[in-house]
Amino acid sequence: MSHDHTIALPRLHQAIELVVRGFGSSEDEVQAVAGNLIEANLTGHDSHGVGMLPRYAQAYLQGDLNPNAHVRVLNDAGTLLRLDGGAGFGQVIGREAMALAIAHARDHGSCIVALGNSHHLGRIGAWAEQVAAAGLVSVHFVNVIARAMVAPFGGSDARFGTNPFCAGVPLPGRPPVILDFATSMIAQGKTRVAYNKGEPVPPGCLIDDQGRPSTEARWAVVPPLGALLAFGAHKGYGLALMCELLGGALAAGATQRESDGSRRRVLNGMFSVLLDPAALGGREAFEREALAFLDWVQASPAREGFADVQVAGDAERAHRARRSAQGVPVDATTWAEILDAARSLGVAPAQVNAAAGVV
């Protein structure tokens, strides 16, 4: 079983920024990519954190990731935006897309955004947080174009990606409610983390290459491949289909229909709806009712084995506080993969280790 390195937050920033500079990125892009990946680790989502860098490096070397790309406006109809990401870093494309959408929603009260051809957008909750910080509500449907990894309900092999859904609601006097989840039982990146640590995945998440249930993470990581299952049987499967139809077919004009695992790109389409509650003429009533409802829900006495009732986003904030103070754990296998990625980008692994304080 792999062990963890625990890396102090400032040192992790220095190390990951070194690696990202190997892509030839501008300094703004270096900060955006490294910051977004590390933020995913801080919130407890290691599947979307610095462990993604090896795959980004492979995609770049294959010509499928374009550093220093910026979002392009293909169509601006005021309350409707169609955007293209040029296969650029999703950490940049996502931020720029949401900035445009926020400006339009403030002007018009709402904005529907169709974003296509972005490289991996990372933790979608980051974009809902950006929108919530502007005082706006948002909903996001995302598709994934990469090797298929999730089986349809009743199917025995993979036919689509983990297709995230996300929603964010800002509230006065308390952090926003941020709901962000893959429509698979677990994110694919969590199987990579489990595989690297030599740990099983929970029962009911995965099938092997014959369609049989398994807890061995290898079936989602190394050939011959099995498939992840959608959460909630037909319910998660149905939501995954909507993410593909809206985030893929409608927003991106591209859906998942390939099984070629040799290409390491991860392209996302995202269909987003942003709304200013004030435009409905009832921000105060909305906020009053929302706060009263959340207080009512969280007043429920905790069951045995549980702490206080939480709402979406609370767990991530607790992780962020703890890891910011104590350091970020990165398992040794993932760290070795990051060092290999650095080497492939022309960055000396010894420099990365020195920056991170890893011996």
Image (spheres, helix red, strand yellow):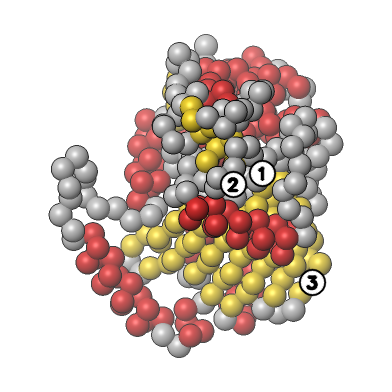
Q: Nearer the viewer, mark 3 or mark 2?
A: 2
Q: Which residue is mark 2?
A: 152
Front residue of 204/218: it is 204
Q: In the rendering, at what x and y percent does residue 41 appear? A: 49, 37
Residue 133 lies, in percent from the top left, at 49, 63
Amino acid bearing label 1: Arg
**The disc labelled 3 sits on which kind of residue?**
Asn
**Quadrant of the drawing holding the N terminus:** top left
Look at mark 3 in the image and give the residue it sits on.
75
Q: Say left or right for 71 vs 101.
A: right
How many angstroms separate mark 3 from mark 2 (CA)?
A: 34 Å
The reply to whether residue 27 is visible in this rendering is: no
Q: Are marks 1 and 3 in contact (CB under 8 Å)?
A: no
SS for dot 1? loop
Does the residue at mark 1 contact the one at mark 2 (Cβ under 8 Å)? yes
Residue at left 75%, top 63%?
83
Kind of element beneath mark 2: loop
